Amino acid sequence: MNGHWIPPEVDTLTPWWLNPVENTAAIQLIHRTLAMLTGLVVLVLAARVLNARLPGRAGRAALAAGAMVLLQIAMGIATLLTVVWVPIAAAHQAGAILMVSMLVWLLFELRPVGRG
């Protein structure tokens, strides 16, 4: 983003509503913002699950989800720093699938225990 928090090119398209879907600067800004928010939410969730000391594998799933979100953020940054080197970009895409998988596993482990 050339040293800007919000790049100046973020709203250059007309009509304005094309910017979030066709303007690469706006798309990158939205992606980064959602990535940081998602990372924060997953890390808070993982910390809360770990602090709760729940029985079973919930702690392991929370730890895996927290680690995966950190790895996913690191791969996203590496993708940008290498100017979208395809192997790292592909790993970042595969990481998204693993991230969703870890969250589904965590959701499964957090399900209520049925009454017998």
Image (cartoon, rainbow, N blue to C red):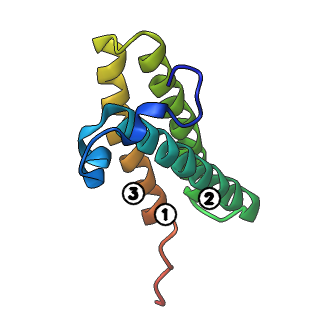
Tag in front: 1 or 3: 3
Mark 1 → mark 2, Cα distance in angstroms: 13 Å
Seen at 29% across and 37% down, the residue is 23
Secondary element at tag 2:
helix
Q: Neighbour class for label 2 at 10 Å: few (<14), some, many (≥20)?
A: some
SS label for mark 3 = helix
Q: Position of residue 65 (x, y in %)?
A: 52, 46
Distance from the alpha carbon under mark 1 to that under mark 3:
9 Å
User: Residue shown at 34%/23% (left/top)?
Assistant: 91
**Residue named by callout 1:** 109
**Residue 36: x %, y % from top left:** 56, 44
Residue toward you, 6 or 55: 6
Name the disc covering residue 104, or none: 3
Give me the residue at 52% from left, 40% from top: 69
Q: Which of 74 and 8 is in front in this view?
A: 8
Disc on res. 100: none
Q: In terms of secondary structure, where does tag 1 sit? A: helix
How much space separates mark 3 and mark 2, taking CA atoms?
13 Å
Which amino acid, by three-letter code, is at mark 1? Answer: Glu
Looking at the picture, does residue 70 appear above or below residue 21? Answer: above
> Which of disc 3 and disc 1 is earlier in sequence?
3
Which residue is nearer to you in this view: 12 or 26? 12
Residue 89, position as x, y percentages in the image: 33, 21
Name the kind of residue labelled 2 in the image: Leu
Disc on the earlier residue, 3 or 2: 2
Whether residues under marks 3 and 2 lie with C-beta atoms below 8 angstroms apart, the answer is no
- Return the x and y of residue 15 as percentages of the image width and height: 24, 51
Q: Name the residue under label 2.
A: 45
The first of marks 1 and 2 along the sequence is 2
